[in-house]
Amino acid sequence: MPANRVEVLHGVNLDTLGSRDPDKYGNFTLPELEVKIGRFARELGLTTQFFHSNHEGEFVEHLHRLAEVADAAIVNAGAWTHYSWAVRDALEFSGVPAVEVHISDVSAREDWRKTSVFDGLVIGRVFGKKEEGYREALQLIARELGVDAP
């Protein structure tokens, strides 16, 4: 079987999509976003699985098992991106190539959001493109895995 399994991990507060500031986060809910991501992935010959948690320890434990279920990952860890070295270490431990995604433009927000614990670890960072950022992340992963799009 070709390497094409992508785990999409959503961290803290991503379950509040649809009720958060639509200018920053769009008007879609997390389930609606996952449907779009699945469609983007199929266009590229990738399969997706989804995981969400608001609990850092649960997120870390899932990352520990990531290599068993995925060949690559998209990680939107929410605010954990900016300070959780535990999440970073767990992603590094997983050994799978990953792309960091943020729906909002973290580079144009508070100074603390400009820091990423994933710097130097991920194969790419995509932010400020709302749901389209996930398409771009999947394209990066497809190239990294050598998957030929249909």
Image (cartoon, rainbow, N blue to C red):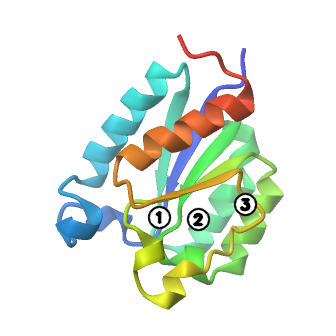
The residue beneath circle 2 is 59
Work out how far the residue at label 1 is from the one at label 2, CA to CA, in angstroms. 6 Å
User: Are the two marked residues, 2 and 3, in contact with CB atoms closer than 8 angstroms?
Assistant: no
Q: Earlier in the sequence, mark 1 or mark 2?
A: 1
- In the image, taking residue 90 as reference, residue 22 lies left or right, namely left
The residue beneath circle 3 is 91
**Mark drawn on residue 3:** none
Q: Quadrant of residue 84?
A: bottom right
Q: What residue type is labelled 2?
A: Phe
User: Are the two marked residues, 1 and 2, in contact with CB atoms closer than 8 angstroms?
Assistant: yes
Residue at (65, 52) in percent of width and height = 124
Q: Where is residue 8 in the image (x, y as percent from the top left)?
A: 52, 47
For label 3, count other residues whose C-alpha is less than 10 Å away and answer few (under 14), some (14-19) or many (20+): many
Q: In which quarter of the image is residue 69?
A: top right
Q: In which quarter of the image is residue 140?
A: top right
Work out how far the residue at label 2 is from the one at label 3, CA to CA, in angstroms. 10 Å
| Secondary structure at numbered mark 1 | loop
Quadrant housing the N terminus: top right
Q: Which amino acid does label 1 sit on?
A: Ser
The residue beneath circle 1 is 53
| Secondary structure at numbered mark 2 | helix
Q: Which of marks 1 and 3 is nearer the N terminus?
A: 1
Q: Which amino acid does label 3 sit on?
A: Leu
- In the image, taking residue 108 as reference, residue 111 lies left or right, namely right
- In the image, taking residue 16 as reference, residue 128 lies left or right, namely right
Residue at (21, 52) in percent of width and height = 28
Work out how far the residue at label 1 is from the one at label 3, CA to CA, in angstroms. 15 Å
Residue at (50, 89) in percent of width and height = 111
Q: Is residue 140 above or below residue 28?
A: above
